[in-house]
Image: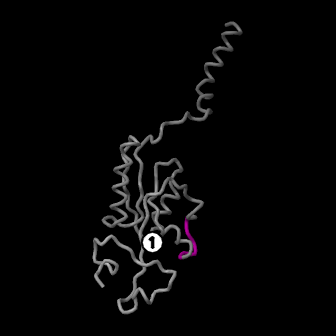
Amino acid sequence: MTRFRMLLAATCACVPFLQASLPASAQPFPSRPVTLLVPFAAGGPSDALGRVIAQAMTGPLGQQVVVENVGGAGGTLGGAKVAAARPDGHTMLLASIGQATSVTLYRKLPFHPVESFETVGMVGEVPMTIVGRRATSSPSAMPAWVPRPTCAGCCSCRACRPR
């Protein structure tokens, strides 16, 4: 056997080992179904929103988006599960104010609400109102910095009721 053929045979024998040591080429995302984890029980408003979002994401992603409900501890159990998942984008969390405030409520969390997650996008805004007992909630009794109610006249709120 010539020297060239020996070198060629040795090179061919090493090719599989060289390929195994090279980084894998990037696979298209997503390469499998995506899990959207809703950190509250099934059947509630967060679950309903998660299912609408999952359905809307399925088409553009070209993969099924599956909703998984993991309720408990104000949403922190679900947050912990996503924080422990592989960081490949196939497991996402429908985060809520519960994850942001959990640091003030629990001494020890298995995740950090900011450092453990990457924001993908905002889903919507949650309207909140200030309410009080009817006897004490007169608009004239409210401080000046509280915005006065405005409404389109489509409901029975205090702003829409005839005075």
x then y, percent, for residue 31 = 44, 40
Looking at the picture, tell me which residue is in the foreground, 1 or 99: 99
What colouring method underlies this structural image? one colour
Can you say whether 46 is above or below 159 in the image? above
Can you say whether 148 is above or below 137 in the image? above
| Residue in the picture at 40% in, 86% down | 132
**Left or right of residue 95, residue 59 in this image:** left
Q: Quadrant of residue 106?
A: bottom right
x then y, percent, for residue 83 = 52, 58
Category of crowding for the residue at label 1, using alpha-carbon neighbours closer than 10 angstroms: few (below 14), some (14–19), many (at least 20): some
Q: Quadrant of residue 133?
A: bottom left
| Residue in the picture at 71% in, 9% down | 3
| Residue in the picture at 63% in, 15% down | 9
Q: Quadrant of the N terminus?
A: top right
Can you say whether 67 is above or below 62 in the image? below
> Magenta stretch?
105-110
x then y, percent, for residue 80 = 50, 63
Looking at the picture, tell me which residue is in the foreground, 120 or 139: 139
Q: Is residue 107 magenta?
A: yes
x then y, percent, for residue 70 = 40, 63
Residue extending furthest right?
3
- Number of on-image labels: 1
Residue extending furthest bottom?
135
| Residue in the picture at 45% in, 63% down | 78
Can you say whether 101 is above or below 35 in the image? below
Q: Is residue 103 magenta?
A: no
Give the residue pinned by disc 1. 74
Q: Quadrant of the C terminus?
A: bottom left
Q: Amino acid at mark 1?
A: Gly
Residue extending furthest front?
163
Secondary structure at badge 1 equals helix
The secondary structure that most of the magenta stretch takes on is: loop
